[in-house]
Amino acid sequence: MSADATDPATEEASGGPAVRRLADWDADRLRDLAADHGTPLYVTDLDRVAQNCVRLRDAFPDAEIRYAVKAHTGRAVLETVRESGIDAECASAGEVRRALDAGFAGERLHYTAVNPPARDLDLVVEWWTAHPELTITVGARDTLDRLAERGFDGRVCVRVNPGIGAGHHEKVRTGAAAKFGVPYDRAADVVADARDDFEVVGVHAHAGSGIHGEDDLAAHRELVARMGDLAREVGDLEYVDVGGGFGVPYHEDDPPLDLDAVAAATREALGDVDAALAVEPGRYVVADAGVLLTAVNTVKPTPDTTVAGVDAGMTDLLRPAMYDAYHAIRNLDADTDGGRGRGPVTVAGPICETGDTFCDGRELSVPERGDLLAVGNAGAYGYEMASTYNSRPRPAEVTLDGDVLRERETLDGVTRLERGGGSE
Ligand SMILES: *Cc1c(COP(=O)(O)O)cnc(C)c1O
């Protein structure tokens, strides 16, 4: 807590500080939680989730805000988001199920069907009969046909591949992004045709790339402007959904995202449209509300760096291995025992993969065996991307108050699905 922190109640009502840094977490509290629940351990601060929701609502007072559930699907997180008045955007039938379980009403549920497996469509259409106000966002004519075959004639939103401009977006346009949405030039036709069979309530685009700096903001503005053009062309929509991707400062030196500037740029770029603005932040809601705690089990000096072997790995937090993502790391024991020197440290997990490191040669306090490390901004796409590779059980997750959100997986849990197979 900074010395000039205001009264906690006021802070919560006002959405709290623009960012919570790893340094702001209470080391004693985190150490107690690790002692009680073991490591690796995710710790989630539900109050911070609520604050992030408040800040989003303050920045986008007249927009529909949908939390991209895939960033963190924990029940208590979903309930906190729901109570904060934010809706749910779901990427699979499983996420729709979680959102229903967490009490989201149908009209607050949006299912984004990306190459949806038949089983997902079957389930969502089945649930739709009980929750006819839910909306399905569709990125291909083919998906519309498959919905019609299942008797669905409800609320549909057409996902568009915005294919913004040239230059540094060219790669995105010809590459992976072709997967998402109908090509911009065909979007109006798809909307017109879809209106024969469905209630088309919106158009949607998600750039995906995470808005951090000025360049990103310019790209975001362009995407929003194009969506505004499309909305004016097709007319008669409830909303224009411009996706998520609001960035968070992963690096200690990154400034916080200026949410008000993003909101102002979004409104300006959208222009005069007779439809509500909708946004779908995922990361922004949960990233700085979570840390991953991990214990040092091996210390190995090498010529270039001290390797600190820890009990969490890429199976617990995949982002560094998968995206080369930077996550702040803090030695919670060095906070109290300053005797440790500083130097280049490589924090490495127990998985047999070179990529299984959280940092490589980073200037940190040199750990001792038994030290507890905290990995920052682990609330988004952290637990969600956990796996059991190397037959490692998935970690436990608790709230800052010590309530268990997800139990630590057991070895029996890891092998639960195994069958003998083979010949008779
Ligand atoms: C993942 C996703 C989001 C959220 O992205 P963030 O970067 O976490 O904000 C929003 N909309 C859709 C369709 C997504 O797939």
Image: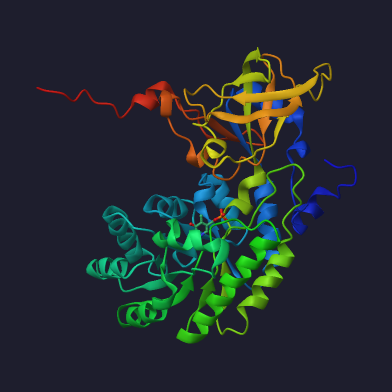
Residue farthest toward the right in the current orientation of the protein: 4
Question: Residue at the spot x=54%, y=46% of the render?
Answer: 72
Task: Tell me the quarter of the image containing the N terminus.
Answer: top right
Residue 332 appears in the picture as rendered: no
Residue farthest toward the front in the current orientation of the protein: 167
222, above or below 120, in the image? below
| Residue 5: percent from left, percent from top | 86, 47
| Residue 69: percent from left, percent from top | 51, 53
Number of residue marks: 0
Question: Residue at the spot x=55%, y=24% of the render?
Answer: 349
| Residue 27: percent from left, percent from top | 75, 29
Which sits in the foreground, 250 or 16?
250
Task: Using residue 277 as the reference point, say whether residue 328 is left or right of it.
Answer: right
Task: Using residue 415 as the reference point, say whether residue 79 is left or right of it.
Answer: right
Question: Residue at the spot x=38%, y=69% of the render?
Answer: 132
Residue 245 appears in which quarter of the rendering?
bottom right
Residue 180 appears in which quarter of the rendering?
bottom left
Task: Tell me the quarter of the image containing the C terminus.
Answer: top left
94, above or below 296, in the image? below
Residue 330 appears in the picture as rendered: yes
Task: Using residue 93 as the reference point, say whether residue 393 is left or right of it.
Answer: right
100, above or below 423, in the image? below
Question: Residue at the spot x=51%, y=59% of the render?
Answer: 88
